[in-house]
Amino acid sequence: MDTTSPSHSTSLPGHTGKWFASDFNFNHLYPLYIQALASKHWTPLKVVEKASRFLAATPGAKILDIGSGPGKFCIAGAYYNPDVFFYGIEQRIDLVRYASVAKEMAGFNNITFMHGNVLELDFRQYDHFYFFNSFYENLPGTYKIDDRFVYSRTLYHQYNRYLHYQLGKVPAGTRLVTYHCTEDEAPQGYRLVRAEIDRLLKFWIKD
Ligand SMILES: C[S@@+](CC[C@H](N)C(=O)[O-])C[C@H]1O[C@@H](n2cnc3c(N)ncnc32)[C@H](O)[C@@H]1O
């Protein structure tokens, strides 16, 4: 697995808030084809704000975005929560590169983007988790980011099983936010503490 930012430190001084005034502004951190995918695939800023504030429960916490795309959740999360560390794992190398460029443009260094498959990660290295139904593209009839991968129901189930196994290994008190996930995907042992946006956005704590 490649990482694009091995060290941790706080947000750079002088980062600009202009990118975070709207989703439209934020999109301009990316090339046009990444912008064109935003409405279907990248988390809206108002959702990032709610989710990341819930996950940033303690200063210094390590928050993992499972399937981080071009990094919107981590970058905007770092803007709203300068005292925690954001990590993203993403299987598409081009998206990891765009994420790294956007991170530099926005002026943060409390973010680490990793290129790899979620199957390579041990979740015990992180404190809290964000999941925007990343494996959904494996199901037939769903919007795909591109046609570079072979999609299958088998992969969808394999990834979800791994996700649930990993979420089962982390300690009580772990926080999780899911976006666009169905109730069936509720992880065992996690208590739903809040739901918003027609139950598309759910906040969980492990008992
Ligand atoms: C719906 S997008 C969400 C992007 C980002 N988390 C956000 O909220 O803006 C899901 C991302 O997960 C990635 N992904 C899907 N399966 C993955 C896997 N097995 N390992 C790593 N990344 C994966 C996809 O490439 C895609 O970029």
Image (cartoon, grey):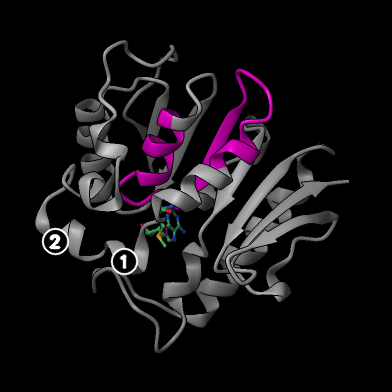
**Is residue 133 found left or right of 12 in the rendered image?**
right
Q: What residue is rendered at 33% in x and 22% in y?
A: 108
The correct choice, above or below, for 171 with respect to 178 in the image is: above
Q: Residue furthest front?
A: 21
Q: What residue is rendered at 61% in x and 31% in y?
A: 56
Name the spot of residue 119 as percent of width and height, x first. Answer: 54, 52
Q: Tell me which image quadrant ligand 1 sits in.
A: bottom left
Where on the picture, by quarter, is residue 34? Answer: bottom left
SS for dot 1: helix
Range of magenta residues: 52-79
Q: Is residue 71 visible?
A: yes
User: Marks 2 and 1, how far apart in space?
Assistant: 12 Å
Q: In front of the other: label 2 or label 1? A: 1
Where on the picture, by quarter, is residue 150? Answer: bottom left
Name the spot of residue 167 as percent of width and height, x first. Answer: 71, 49
The correct choice, above or below, for 53 with respect to 116 in the image is: above
Q: Nearer the viewer, residue 91 or 72?
A: 72
The correct choice, above or below, for 139 with respect to 21 in the image is: below
Q: Which label was assigned to residue 180? A: none
Q: Which label was assigned to residue 39? A: 1
Residue at mark 2: 33
Q: What residue is rendered at 10% in x and 57% in y?
A: 32
Name the spot of residue 151 as percent of width and height, x first. Answer: 39, 77
Residue 86 forms part of the magenta stretch: no
Category of crowding for the residue at label 1, using alpha-carbon neighbours closer than 10 angstroms: few (below 14), some (14–19), many (at least 20): few
Mark closest to the chain's N terminus, 2 or 1: 2
Q: What residue is rendered at 60% in x and 73% in y?
A: 157
Category of crowding for the residue at label 2, using alpha-carbon neighbours closer than 10 angstroms: few (below 14), some (14–19), many (at least 20): few
Name the spot of residue 68 as percent of width and height, x first. Answer: 41, 48
